[in-house]
Amino acid sequence: MIRLALLGCGRAAALHAGLLRRHRQQVSLAFASREPARAHALTERFGGRAFASYEAALASTEIDAVVILTPPALHLELALLAVAAGKHVVLEKPALPTSADCERLAAAAQAAGTHIYVAENYFYKPLARCLRRLLSEQVIGDVLFVHVNAIKQQQTSGDWRDDPTQALGGALYEGGIHWISLIANIGMTVRRVQGFRPALAPNAALERSMLLSCTFEEGAVGTLSYSWEIPSTARGLRLSKIYGRSGTITFESNGLWVFCHGKRTRLYVPGLVDLAGYRAMWTDIVAALQSSQPAAFTLAHARRDLLLIEQAYASATER
């Protein structure tokens, strides 16, 4: 039984606690918050134990691992405290403030004999697995273009996500990091990205839209259009495409379906039950915690994604 404490008791904590119900024979839950009432509210809903502070959970000998669900600005501090206390750590996205912080945390975890896991569900999406398989099988030949459409309209949250000092940045840090991870995990290696930032909305503190161009080691080029402020069909249905010399893969960006027209023509429905990839993600992380082994998505993957975001923002600023 892995004794797991969730640090932070907002929406993400309720989401992950609900998902971990599937692993109740393997994982016991505890909740910690700077507002004790929030931790107690989640224990009433999901069971388990409440801690009145993050520090109390980290100091407890009855906790084996923690899931850090706080604003991203606190991730590094809490993760370092956790590994110093001998705890394994699961980090929500974005894992850490900078790519350099990943190296610092990895060194600290190695010295403490603990493991770092990252809850990046897009890596585990059925869509990502389907695209990796199709590209590995060369069903559209050599890939030339990758166009990912991640445009939708989403209301601002009115919480820490609108505070640059807590959220670390704007569109790419809060949600775009998922799509960068998707592009980087379809079976090709992203060499570099270039960011293009449109004009900010009036009175906006953070950007909500970014365009990225990228080059792949394998020779392809690609784009990611990411926005929270553009209406899309059916509140989020979007089409993306991968073009190869022998055909085209068209997919609904969320992963509802994939249509391949190339060396074979076929419609795929990768997996509606776990469309967002959360179930597969927690199955992998729980198994890794039990065996004290790395998960499929590693801190090195998270560092790469952060490095690509840093390249995007740096190049957008230069322009």
Image: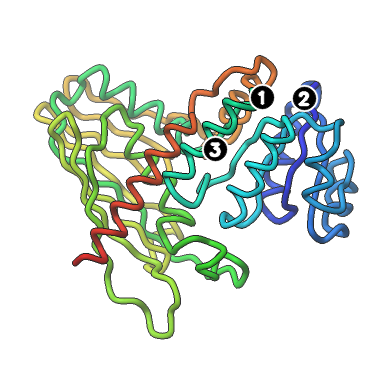
Give the Cα separation between the discs numbered 1 and 3. 21 Å
Quarter of the image that includes the N terminus: top right
The residues bearing labels 1 and 2 have C-alpha atoms spaced at a distance of: 8 Å
How many neighbours does mark 3 have within 10 angstroms: few (below 14), some (14-19), or many (20 or more)?
many
- Residue 2: which disc? 2
Q: Measured along the vertical axis of the image, is residue 119 above or below residue 13? A: above
- As rendered, which of 232 and 200 lies closer to the eye? 200
Q: Mark 1 points at which residue?
A: 286
Q: What residue type is labelled 3?
A: Leu
First of labels 3, 2 by sequence position: 2
In space, the residues marked 3 and 2 are separated at their CA atoms by 22 Å
At x 49%, y 65%, the residue is: 154
CB atoms at circles 1 and 2 under 8 Å apart? Answer: yes
Image quadrant of residue 185? top left
Residue 95 at x, y = what percent? 52, 44
Q: Is residue 252 left or right of residue 27?
A: left
Say if 279 sits above or below 159 in the image.
above
What kind of residue is marked 2?
A: Ile
Callout 1 amino acid: Val
Q: Describe residue 214's horizontal placement relative to residue 81 as left or right.
A: left
Looking at the image, which residue is at 64% across and 19% down? Answer: 287
Quadrant for the C terminus in the image: bottom left
